[in-house]
Image: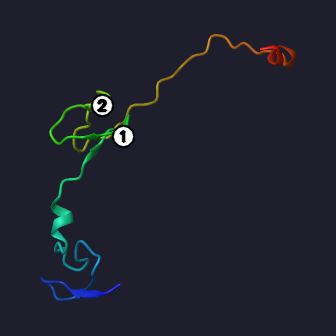
Amino acid sequence: MALIQCKNCGKDVSDRAKVCPHCGTQLIEDEVTQPQPIICEECGAEIPQGADSCPNCGCPVPVDGEENTEAPQKVELTSVKILKLDQRKKK
C-alpha cells in the first residue's frame, strides 16, 4: 500500500482510498461518480437506469431509501402423508 497526499488537506492517505478520511475530499472521482447498476432482488438480472420494473421477471424496482420490509408469506399445511418404509421402496 502506497501513501499519497490529499489534494485538499495535504495529509497522507492510502492510494486505494476513494475519499480522504481526514477531510472527506473525493480522491478517485471516476469510481465514485459512476452510477451503480441496479440488481433485481428476484432474479439477479441488471435493471436499466430509470426502469420501474425488471425486464427479465417483472419484479418492481424499490424506490431509493425504501427497503423491502415485506414479511415472508405464511403457508398453512392441511395434511401430510407419511409413507411407511416398505411403501417407499415400492415407488
What type is the residue that disc 2 sits on?
Asn
**Which mark is on residue 56?**
2
Q: Is mark 1 on a helix, strand or loop?
A: loop
Image quadrant where residue 69 sits: top left
**Which mark is on residue 44?**
1
Horizontal and vertical percent position of residue 16: 29, 76
Against 27, residue 53 (above or below) is above
Q: How crowded is mark 2: few (under 14 residues within 10 Å), some or many (20 or more)?
A: few
Front residue of 25 and 17: 17
Q: From mark 2 to mark 1, how far is it between C-alphas? A: 9 Å
Against 60, residue 65 (above or below) is below
Against 17, residue 55 (above or below) is above
What type is the residue that disc 1 sits on?
Gly
Q: Total label count?
A: 2
Whether residues under marks 2 and 1 lie with C-beta atoms below 8 angstroms apart, the answer is no
Q: Quadrant of the image for the C terminus?
A: top right
Against 1, residue 80 (above or below) is above
Front residue of 44 and 61: 44
